[in-house]
Amino acid sequence: MTTDTLDAVDHSGGLARRSLTPIEVTAQSVANVAPSAVIAFAPAQMAASAGNGAWFSFLIGTGIALVVAYSVVVFARRRAGVGSLYSLVRPALGPTGSFITGWALLIGVIAIAAGSLCGVGFFVAQTLDQFGVTLFDGILGQIVIDLVMLALALYLMITSVRISARVSAVLELLSITVIVITLVIIFVKSGKFIDGAQLSLTGATFSGIAFAIVLAILGFVGFESAASLGQESNDPFRAIPRAVTRSAILAGILYIFATYAQVAQFKGGAAALAASGSPMDDLTKQWGLSFLQPVLDIGFSASFFAVVVACITVGARILFGMSNEGLLPVWLGHAHPVHRTPAKAIWLMVGIVAVPAVVVIALGTAPLAATGYIDTVGVFGYMVSYAAVCIGAPLFLRHLGVRQIALATTLGIVGTVALAYVFYTNVFPVPAYPLNTLPYWFLATMVVGLVGFAVLRSRRPQVAAQAGSFADDA
């Protein structure tokens, strides 16, 4: 399929069509995954339940992510649009299935962006603390930082998708480099490369490992976000599948290494790591590398910021696509006349993302705890959309009459069952407050969207039938 053929049907809605290189498309997925931000807090939270099995939870999470990646690639090789998974699944699941997928994904990107915004505030304040500036440590200071960072993200996203993707990817790459170098130095200083307790999963339980997998999956959410640039990529049917697969593999390798390293090198092991409020900072102090703390904190700040930008980028394009299909107000489907970005949809996304971040911080929740709570709601949204892709992939291939249906069906079942089980483990047995409320916050927001779509389908069926149609087929 050539670019000329793609340009025969224009579903860009005024966006900068066919303007992004494969590297820039990959940058979107890498920025959305943001491994550095995950490494900053996930290993410690996973160690709280999985103990010495935390790295193993990430290994299982990597397997699940690659299964989902396969299903995403089945669609992405043959279909491209602004709505990411929302647009991809339509040929297999129809307009209703497409809307369910898109609404769940929209909840996911909003929540992950809001949670990551809390992470930005925390690590920016941590960085400033290193230089004696403590003005932003309190609730009001955190909110001020969050809003300033959100304003900066708004400027970057409206100005150019190329600039925002490049800035996010460069910041993430630098942050990953610093983290890896730091952990390697600690390994060399300790001389402890083999941790028998971890390799034998000493003290780890099946239920603990299973519970930690939800956080492992959190580490991968957004690896498919390159699919939201289907209209802006200059080679979507090749660049997007490669970006999806490579970002999942890269993230998996980094997570397993970083989690194993933190548990092995943290004095006191998994239990002490789980009790740490800022694991990487504490780890550098323990090994006499305190001089690296400002650099690490800047890197974590940049990584969380990259997530905010990438998630809003995806969400804005979902809203943009729905608007062009008639499901949402027309004004959301207008591209910026100069920058050719979905400016109005970006503005709306920024406003929505600010609400949960500000409210949860204002209630006195510790910033990284707020990140964990809000992000978990987002993970549930991603899991529903990923399950929809896993279900739809074999149906899509069967409809096309091509090979690999057996493989797609097998992996689709594995992915769907794994995602369903992870959701189940977060509901039963009932976790402590506020974790016990998070699945219901997600379900409530899902119901709002489904009721709205049901009303639309009843009153304007011809409009509802357009859900997910704003895309190109190879």
Image: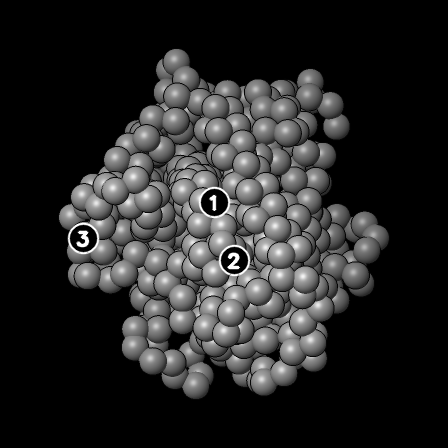
Which residue is under mark 3? 139
Taking the spot 74% from the left edge, 59% from the top edge, the residue there is 408
Q: Is residue 325 above or below residue 234?
A: below
N-terminal of the pair, mark 2 or mark 1, is 2
Q: Amino acid at mark 1?
A: Leu
Q: Is residue 327 visible?
A: no
Q: Position of residue 396 (x, y in %)?
A: 68, 52
Q: Is residue 426 above or below residue 236?
A: below
Nearer the observer, 291 or 389: 291
Q: Amino acid at mark 2?
A: Trp
Pointers 1 and 3 in contact (CB under 8 A)?
no
Q: Which mark is residue 130?
A: none
User: Alpha-carbon neighbours of circle 3 within 10 Å: few (<14), some, or many (≥20)?
Assistant: some
Q: CA distance from mark 2 to mark 3?
A: 31 Å
Which residue is under mark 1? 292
Taking the spot 62% from the left edge, 20% from the top edge, the residue there is 7
| Label 2 secondary element | loop
In this view, the mark in front (2 or 1): 2
| Label 1 secondary element | helix
Q: Position of residue 361 (x, y in %)?
A: 23, 56
Q: Which mark is residue 287?
A: 2
